[in-house]
Image (tube, rainbow, N blue to C red):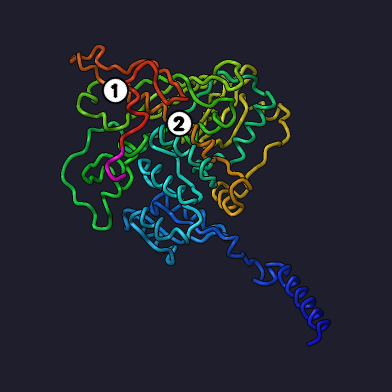
Amino acid sequence: MSNKSRRDFLRTGAMATAGFFIVPRHVLGGPGYIAPSDRLNIAGIGAGGKGASDLAEFAKSPKVNIVALCDVDEAQAAGSMKRFSKAKFYYDYREMLEKEKNNIDAVSVSTPDHTHAIATLAAMEMGKHVYVQKPLTHDIYEARMLTEAAKKYKVVTQMGNQGGSGDGVRSMKEWYDAKLIGKVTKVYAWTNRPVWPQGLAKPGGTHTVPSTMKWDLWIGPSKYEDFNPAYHPFNWRGWWAFGTGALGDMACHIMDPIYRILPILYPNEVECSLPNQFTGAWTEAGYIDSCPPASIIHLNYPRTDGKGEIKVTWMDGGLLPQRPAELLPDEEMGNWDGGVIFEGTKGKMMCDCYGGNPRLLPTSRMKETKLPKQKLKRVPEGHYVQWVNACIAGHGNAETSSPFEYAGPFTESILMGNLAIRSWMIKNPKLTGWGDKYLGRKKLLWDAQNMKITNFDEANQFVKREYRTGW
């Protein structure tokens, strides 16, 4: 072959090769083809209960492969194992992450609250994107730790408070920014939870661990307790060792509009009140291991713009704030799950749980007031798929509604309420009668930067728990 022919051959071949690489992907793979690089391989830590529904939501995206499942109870995970039959199953998330580290891109964590942080951090340290059910963590310290880890490892993060991606909270933010209710000074939030047992004596008796589960793995970093059906598979929420009570379960949903709309970050004061039965005879009977059946939490927030303070009151166990005068007698206040009322200098607004059904008060204002035009981007794909798409786009190229930079401080703020509740029940060892026997019935002053109560050192034991050896 002559030099000219060789040059012509190489030039023609190069052009053909270049042409091959610019053929549209859908032509090569057919309609709907998604390249492997555009797929997200997800592993689920917690594959039963809420974990099963989370994985099902992710799987609605054609871009998702569920490649591995982990659950300490195979019976609870049976539905997910059947649905995602090609996914490998593990009991221990640590083993799964190590063996599947080259096969997974992202991890969904939907376990009881007490294992959220350790499983999430392990995944982040391996560079995996994470979706974590609410509350983000069991302890205040853990929430700060995950917030800092998200910055360090630069992975895509999302907490599972789905209302954060809803239209309702965005509409309310637009109303607030348009000054339709003026400057907010007070907010009330409430829930019907708990709908599981709380305010109970520590369970006893001897029970056989189901053959399908690894109980020691379920206990994880918490102090060891013998297996008891009072803890597994559902009612763990009502026990301090494993759950965070009504506040931890629902405040990430209900209080999200408060935290998302108003110029607040960390509270500087918190106080609470509990039923007398719980703080009196019930506590004497050894009920301090269980979350209370009802509570009222008062949080005080300095405004981040330096223009005063905002007081937030949380109520659970069926307790409700007084109905606003602007609400007609037959109009529903919030909905069955709960709600939020914002009190401003020019009016009020209210929503249901998840930020749903937002309305100005009186509700006649919804027709009389010219509402502002939509300014904030909506999330029509929903909370789950938003995270999936962000993971595929990569850190820095897409956004999520509840990244840890938002969800971490928000969770810290919520867990301040539990710190107050648990502090309330600290006993005065010098007294045996009722009277002033309980030391924690006071306003707690919070130094957020240092994560410390400054006026009652005994309360700081609830900021960070000690992990069991090996965890």
Could you tell whether 331 is left or right of 85 in the image?
A: right
Q: Nearer the viewer, mark 2 or mark 1?
A: 2
Report the residue marked by disc 2.
412
Residue 432 sits in quarter: top left
Q: Residue furthest top?
A: 435
Q: Secondary structure at mark 2?
A: helix
Q: Secondary structure at mark 1?
A: loop
Residue situated in front as seen by the camera: 447 or 158: 447
Which residue does the image show at 63% across and 67% down from the upper left? 33
Classify the position of the C terminus by image quarter: top left
Q: Main secondary structure of the magenta part?
A: loop
Classify 321 as above or below 252: above
Q: How many marks?
A: 2
Residue 469 % position (x, y): 27, 42
Q: Return the disc, 2 or 1, that comes first in the chain's sequence.
A: 2
Q: Which amino acid type is marked by label 2?
A: Glu
**Rendered location of residue 336, percent (x, y):** 47, 35
Q: Is residue 210 magenta?
A: no
Question: Is 223 left, or right, of 175 in this rendering?
Answer: left
Relative to residue 469, is residue 257 depicted above or below?
above
Q: Which mark is residue 401?
A: none
Q: Which one is in front, 408 or 366? A: 408
Q: Residue furthest left?
A: 206
Picture layout, residue 82 above or below residue 447: below
Q: Residue 200 location in percent, x, y?
A: 26, 33
x 38%, y 41%: residue: 113
Crowdedness near tag 1: few (<14), some (14–19) or many (≥20) residues, C-alpha within 10 Å:
many
The residue that label 1 is drawn on is 425
Point out the stretch of residues depicted in magenta.
467-471
Q: Which of 267 and 447 lies nearest the eye of the viewer? A: 447
Label 2 – label 1 distance at C-alpha: 21 Å
